């Protein structure tokens, strides 16, 4: 782990529902590997959860039961993905959701990971407190970031989350003269009360 917030794996899951505790499974994983602010590798795969998905999920994601029938099983995809994320900290938009599914799917195959998570949505709430909401699409449009692919597909969402993450790092760096921001600082920022964010960020430039 580099502990550099600009060297991370940004990931996104599409799933059968909201909670692995209720038996929901992953149906697609997308991720981009970022090193020193540049995307160096991508990972994407559909995965067969072993059961049919609802019409709502088909419409929401554009992923159909026919597509999943041809996809490799979750265990094969997740074993490969566990290698992809080795040695990197992790970022996701609404990270608590993606972490639950990552943990659940890797537990099934007795795999683990060493990286820590940061949430781009929680960071964005501190950086853009006046945004109408903090959905990924809203923040991408607010920052005039080029849209890549379709929202609610895993690789597209991961790629756009990576762009948002790097944009926020750049804004913090430019505003507070801190060229290299540790990953742990972004984790701390995501938990700060909004009233203390500016003071916290200013303290970075003094360290």
Image: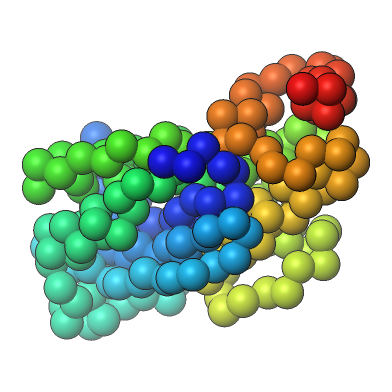
Instruction: Answer yes or no: is residue 141 visible.
Output: yes
Q: Where is residue 133 in the image (x, y as percent from the top left)?
A: 75, 45
Q: In this view, does 139 lie above or below 27?
A: above
Q: In this view, does 2 lie to the left or right of 23?
A: right
**Residue nearest the observer in this picture, 203 or 111:** 203
The part of the image, by quadrant, that contains residue 160 is bottom right
Instruction: Answer yes or no: is residue 187 visible.
Output: no
Residue at (52, 60) in percent of width and height: 34
**Residue nearest the observer in this picture, 35 or 100:** 35
Residue at (30, 50) in percent of width and height: 86
Q: Across the whole image, how many numbered discs are drawn on residues?
A: 0
**Residue nearest the observer in this picture, 64 or 172:** 172
**Residue nearest the observer in this picture, 117 or 140:** 117
Colour scheme employed for the rendering of this structure: rainbow
Q: In which quadrant will I find the N terminus? A: top left
Q: Is residue 40 left or right of residue 194?
A: left
Q: In this view, does 204 lie above or below 48?
A: above
Residue at (43, 76) in percent of width and height: 62
Q: Where is residue 175 in the image (x, y as percent from the top left)?
A: 90, 41
Q: Is residue 163 left or right of residue 14?
A: right
Q: In which quadrant will I find the C terminus? A: top right
Residue at (57, 79) in percent of width and height: 149
């Amino acid at each position: 782990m580099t502990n550099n917030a600009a060297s991370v794996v940004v990931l996104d899951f599409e799933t059968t529902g909201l909670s692995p505790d209720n038996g929901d499974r992953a149906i697609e994983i997308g991720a981009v590997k970022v090193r020193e602010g540049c995307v160096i590798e991508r990972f994407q795969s559909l995965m067969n959860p072993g059961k049919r998905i609802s019409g709502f999920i088909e419409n929401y994601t554009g992923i159909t039961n026919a597509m999943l029938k041809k996809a490799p099983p979750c265990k094969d995809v997740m074993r490969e993905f566990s290698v992809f994320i080795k040695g990197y900290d992790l970022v996701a938009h609404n990270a608590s959701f993606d972490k639950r599914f990552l943990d659940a799917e890797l537990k099934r195959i007795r795999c683990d990971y060493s990286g820590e998570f940061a949430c781009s949505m929680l960071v964005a709430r501190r950086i853009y407190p006046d945004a109408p909401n903090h959905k990924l699409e809203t923040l991408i449009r607010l920052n005039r970031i080029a849209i890549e692919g379709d929202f609610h597909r895993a690789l597209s969402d991961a790629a756009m989350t990576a762009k948002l993450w790097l944009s926020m790092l750049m804004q913090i760096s430019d505003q507070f003269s801190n060229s290299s921001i540790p990953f742990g600082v972004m984790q701390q920022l995501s938990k700060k009360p909004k009233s203390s964010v500016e003071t916290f960020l200013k303290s970075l430039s003094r360290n």
